[in-house]
Amino acid sequence: MTERTLAVVAGGLRQPSSTRLLADKLAAAAGEELTRLGVTPKIELIELRDHAHEIVDNLLTGFPASTFARVVETVAGADGLIAVSPIFTASYSGLFKSFVDLLPDGTLADKPVLIGATGGTARHSLALDHAMRPLFAYTRSVVIPTGVFAAPEDWGGDEGGGRLDQRVRRAAAELAAEVARRDPATPQDPFALRTSFEELLAGE
């Protein structure tokens, strides 16, 4: 079996967090789908609340702490990304946006991304297509067609839970297919020389 890595970014602020629960469901389903396709999944979970102070420090100083730098490296080296944010005031959280802002340009280019969100009302589901999808389109990601939103009623009862599970499985299958058909990710070395000395001397 070949191996592919999925970075799972959960932007929940509280514990326990419905955002983390949705991220776990998506990661488990995507892992199962990759296995079904003959690919060994490696899941790397990142909870942004654990790095909140480092994110703010990075925004203020321009330099990441060593632990946060490893988080960025994990996302850059992943073959696919599952990104889940709580929705506040019809958009993703400030912590989630700050994290995306700190990713070096090109980190998510051509990377398959599954977007998910949680909120206090089903009306917030519009934020998936009006806020999160444009955000990752801007980073030149390959955002898979199915996004997954979980409202409070999706967690209780057979009907709501069944609908959520269907969406999770459909989105996971789309992400797994996109990841499996691609070559393994080759993250860029931030210290690699990308311009030849001839080009430097020529002023190009």
Image (spheres, rainbow, N blue to C red):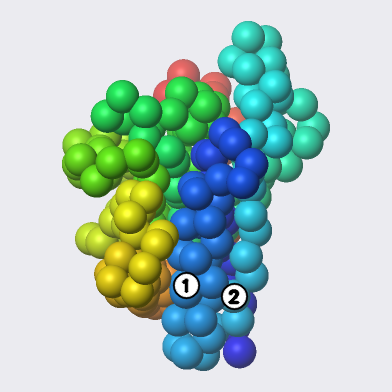
Is 118 left or right of 96, judged from the image as shown? Answer: left
For this rendering, which residue is in front, 90 or 65?
90
At numbered mark 2, what does the secondary structure look like: helix, strand or loop?
A: strand
For this rendering, which residue is in front, 1 or 200?
1
Category of crowding for the residue at label 2, using alpha-carbon neighbours closer than 10 angstroms: few (below 14), some (14–19), many (at least 20): many
Using the image, tell me which numbered label, if any, was put on residue 41.
2
Q: Position of residue 165 (x, y in %)?
A: 36, 72
Identify the residue at horizontal 38%, vertical 57% (top origin): 114
Q: Position of residue 74 (x, y in %)?
A: 65, 50
- Residue positioned most to the right: 66
Identify the residue at horizontal 68%, vertical 16% (top origin): 57
Q: Position of residue 25 (x, y in %)?
A: 49, 66
Using the image, tell me which numbered label, if any, was put on residue 57.
none
Mark closer to the observer (2, 1): 1
Identify the residue at horizontal 24%, vertical 46% (top origin): 122
Q: Quadrant of residue 73?
A: top right
Do the residues under discs 2 and 1 have CB atoms within 8 angstroms?
Answer: yes
Q: Quadrant of residue 168?
A: bottom left
Quote the CA–CA distance across marks 2 and 1. 8 Å
- Quarter of the rendering occupied by the N terminus: bottom right
Is 105 left or right of 4, judged from the image as shown? Answer: left
**Disc 1 marks which residue?**
30
